[in-house]
Amino acid sequence: MLERMSFLFRMIVDELHFILAEKSILSILIVIPILYPIVISWLYIENQPVDRPTLLIDHDNSSLSRQLAIGLDATEQIQITGRPYDVGHGFETMRKQQAELLVYIPREFSSRIKKGEQAKIKLWVNSANMLTYGITYPAVREVVLSTNKMIGERFLTEKGVHPALSKGRVMPISLAERLLYHPTTGYGDFLVTGVFLIIVQQIVLMGLAFSVGLRKERGLFKESERFPFTYLEAKVLAQLVFYLAGIAFIVFVIFPIFDWPVKNKASMFVLFVVFVITMAPLAIIAAKFVKDRYAAFQILMFFSTPLFMISGFAWPFKQMPELIQYVAAIFPATPALQAVRVLSMKSGNLEVVLPFIGWLGIQFLCYLVIAILLLRKSFSRLLFRADTAARA
Amino acid sequence: MKTLISETMVGFKQIATGGRFWVMILLLLLASLGTLKVFDNMVVKQIPIAVLDFDNSKLSRTLKTYLSSTPQLKVVAKGFETVEDAKELFYRGEITAIVLITNDFSSRLKKGQKGFIVVASDMSNILLGKMAHKSIAKVAATLSAGVQMTLVSKLGERKERKLSRVVPISIEESFNFNPATNYMNYLGPGLIFFYLHVFIIIMTSSFLIPPLRPKTAVGIAGRQIAVFVILIALGLLFFYGFLTMANVPIRSGFETVFVMLLFFIISAMMMTLALGAAIPKPLLAMQAAIVIGMLSMMFSGITWPTDMFPRPLQIVAQYIPYTPFAKGMRIFLHYPADLSDLRHINILFAKQIGLFSALSLFGWGIRKLFTTRRNRGAHA
């Protein structure tokens, strides 16, 4: 035991010297956790798409149609950027992605309403981008709803209903909305915190794989050491300083500067650390197979986005096919991202995310056992080869 | 020419016999197929909501029935007695919304007052929260219209005019470019071609770093031609294999798709080569290219519109090859477009290729200058 601890300590120091001597490892461990969060935070700084370019064709040109147009332009979500002379021209502009919405008010719009007939407005929505469609279409509906309300109240008043009462008679069922946890529905708030966790994942995976790969290239990777698992464990522990610094930068600097949602920074920090610990044996398994430093970039880069997508952070977990859910359950990013969502928006209490931490704990144990067995097996194979060579 | 062909063949051989390349290709294909599988359902359905009916009138039961029949919603029987219990359900993600029908709901309506439904929606996942909220609001609006029509009828309005008095303005909507408003069409192509973009960068870089980096310019060209052919094959597989399997229709002709793919691959490869020429250390150049590649999805405008970026990042986005390709895909995938419809996209590609070529020549020129000076110094 003492021998193992002494070996561990020596290897930690060795790895720290190696990291400090090699700028390329430092660039992964320091530059990535600084650069990516800043760039991504800056990118989503507006948080909510507003003023989506909208085209309006008003062939009615009545006071009601103008009122509707003013209502549309007054919304935060929509900005009327053009008034093409016909639908064909307007649609062409949409096709070129220069507008997201085309609203057409036909000639007989107000006259139909005056006659007590239903008037239609036509709407062409670019639904290729579901985010902006999800913002512009409800905005148009809201304006039309308000206009309908006004017309409805006027009708009832004309029919002899007291104006004060007619307000209650038009659209009589009212929704008292409580938008919980994320009332602003900002897209940046929704997405960015999860992306930060994936960045940390990549730093752990790639930092270790790169270091091991570089050592193998230079003949500095001594696989025949007595404690094969401890040898790699030491590297993870040495790099842990950098992981923790990166996490601290993200949670205590980036979060407050850019005002990303977090209920309790300390809890979020702890969650990230638990995630890193869970990732450690997985990083050891991945590092076992790299032959050189380039493999870290060539192979491990393909894990970040797919793992993010299958985690349930963006696309709901239960909406995925079962097979994907089972695959996703294997990876630490899945419970960690779900816990991030809770700690960023719902509660700062770690107790609430204990089920996810438990899930991470089970993963950690499984990966640890696999890592130890794998390294022992390869070490045994190595000993067998050395023994056979010695006898020959 | 012969040398170029033989170097290209060497490139093919290195890829075919290089285990690492097979691993990379396999990961690319698995990641792409797995990502497409995520959106198999295409739209969000059966979002769990709980309904608390304290009114228990005919109207409130009608509301519950309408909510249950909505395909986007699933009314679940979750018993909870306190706000804390409800919070637990939200924390665990077991429900997305609670609809509370107040005990005076129908009586207020009978008296001509507004009846209230309290809707508490979990907006932490805006996709689920907004869909649930929208669906509940639609049901409430339909029921509301029904109540209002009863009043309008009592006021003596003719049968054929009732709807127009309640809903005087209706919207005739047409969802273009993604008519089913499904997430497969929205994100599927964007994600798999993002993976391809990263793959292009990695493959191109792989022949610029030791030990595979050839010593001569012809050798480099030959390897890159081999990479190019494989990338074209993969790109076509993505369009006509994976997207077809995922039921994402391609509305434009083969020529348009092929030319756009060609420009995309050439631009991405040129960017990688330019960085390789401009940055002396091969590993650093590879890292820089991959950093750009990994950010390209966010810079593409597929999810977050580019006009919402800060101005400096809008400029940066214009020079990432994936950006014009993603914008172009939005057009040629969802609409029968020809190359003239994509002129503004091709201009962006031309600018990029021009810039990257200039950078490559400049970088190569500087290197040659330093090498020549060094050799002269050594001879002296």
Image: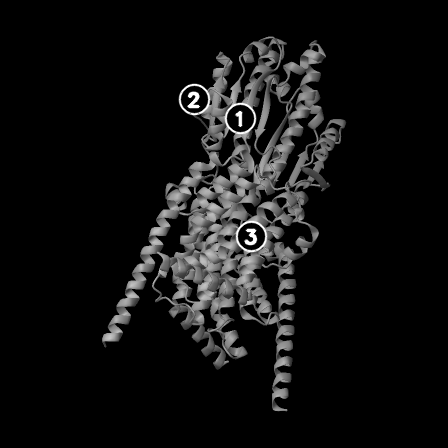
Nearest to the observer: residue A249 or residue A105: A249
Q: CA distance from mark 2 to mark 3?
A: 43 Å
Give percent across and percent down for residue A90: 67, 43
The residue carrying mark 1 is B136
The amino acid type found where label 1 is placed reads Ile
- For numbered disc 2, what is the local secondary structure? loop
Three-letter code, disc 3: Gly
> Residue B32 location, x and y as percent?
45, 52
Residue in front for this viewpoint, B359 or B164: B359
Q: Which residue is mark 2?
A: B79
Kindly identify which residue carries mark 3.
Answer: A246
* Residue A349 position in % (x across, y down): 51, 34
State whether discs 2 and 1 lie on one chain: yes
Give the residue type at disc 2.
Answer: Gly
Q: Left of B309 or right of it: where is B195?
A: left
Marks 2/1: CA–CA distance = 20 Å
Residue at 56% across, 9% down: B107
Q: Most extreme residue toward the front, as rendered? A: A2
